[in-house]
Amino acid sequence: MKKAKLFPLFLLFISAFTACNNDDDTTPEVAKPTITNVEIGSANNKQGVIGRDFHFNADVTAGDKIAAVQLKILPKKGEKYTSDWKLELSWAEYVGAKNTTVHKHFNIPNEAPEGKYDFFFTVLDSNGSKLEIKEDFTIVDAANLPTDPLIGRDMISRNETLIYHMGTWVEPELIFKKDDILTAHAQISQIKGDGILYSVLIKKSAYYHPESIDNLDFKKVIVISKVEHKGLAAASKISTLQKINDVWGGEKIVIGAATDANLPNANPITGEKAWESGVYNWVVLYKNTTYNLNVYKSMPITINY
């Protein structure tokens, strides 16, 4: 009788001991970093051009806090290169942040050989977790690009008077008042195939810096001109100046106008982009849609409204 009573007590003891052990073995899962809005190269074309500016963007949210941010371009296994080369970068300014945008520009070094590479972006978290993305990446020589868009002949006039042309500032500050006519001219050369050109005004206070037409937010930009081309031969060029209804123009806007010059439908200049006094950026953006190549240029003007 005594043995029969002790056996259930023994089972109860073993169950309780096992439950305690299970509790001890359970480790809370730590939150890992997350990443959105990744852009590797202009318009996320995953390409770098030797000796040229390279663009990278990523919005990062840490599980706890960022411990390290690293970018690497490494030789791909099985590929052959004219020389040994790799690129490894890290940026200490993001350490300790919870949420941040990693937006970087740097040149692809002149010594980088053409070829296919592995592109790594890594975020280490202070809680011990890690996020790493890996993408195929290509480095090319500009001489071997199918087309090489260049922005040039950039000029700004106020009421038909030239006040800036190709790096020369006739006036130290380009100032416009309400009802002034702003003419903004630019040319895109060394192009072929299909493409789109935008010339826009953006308030500096908007903290909005599009580097590709794919990222244009028309709630924030005032379109001065939009030009499209199709089927151009090699080494062609276009400009913001265009023929509309047999009249040359299409690159002017009146400061204070009710609508912009977007095509095919003009946008009202209201809300976030309503006219006001302050510094604006004149931004020229071009995308060759045939070859997914993008260029842009930005310069400041001042509006005293």
Image (cartoon, rainbow, N blue to C red):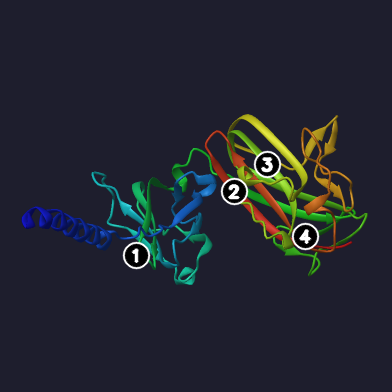
Q: Residues within 10 Å of mark 3 (few under 14, many from 20)?
A: many
Spatial separation of the CA atoms under disc 1 and disc 4? 53 Å
Q: Is residue 199 left or right of residue 7?
A: right
Spatial separation of the CA atoms under disc 4 and disc 3? 20 Å
Residue to which mark 4 is pinned? 164
Residue to which mark 1 is pinned? 128
Spatial separation of the CA atoms under disc 1 and disc 2? 39 Å
Spatial separation of the CA atoms under disc 1 and disc 3? 46 Å
Q: Tell me where residue 142 appears, x and y as whole percent.
A: 47, 47
Element type at mark 4: strand
Q: Earlier in the sequence, mark 1 or mark 3?
A: 1
Residue type at mark 4 is Tyr
Residue to which mark 3 is pinned? 197
The answer to whether residue 270 is above or below residue 146 is below
Q: What residue occupies the far right of the structure in this picture?
A: 179
| Labels 2 and 3 touching (C-beta < 8 A) | no
Residue type at mark 2 is Val
Residue at 80% from the left image edge and 44% from the top image edge? 251
Residue at 7% from the left image edge and 57% from the top image edge? 2
Q: Earlier in the sequence, mark 2 or mark 3?
A: 3
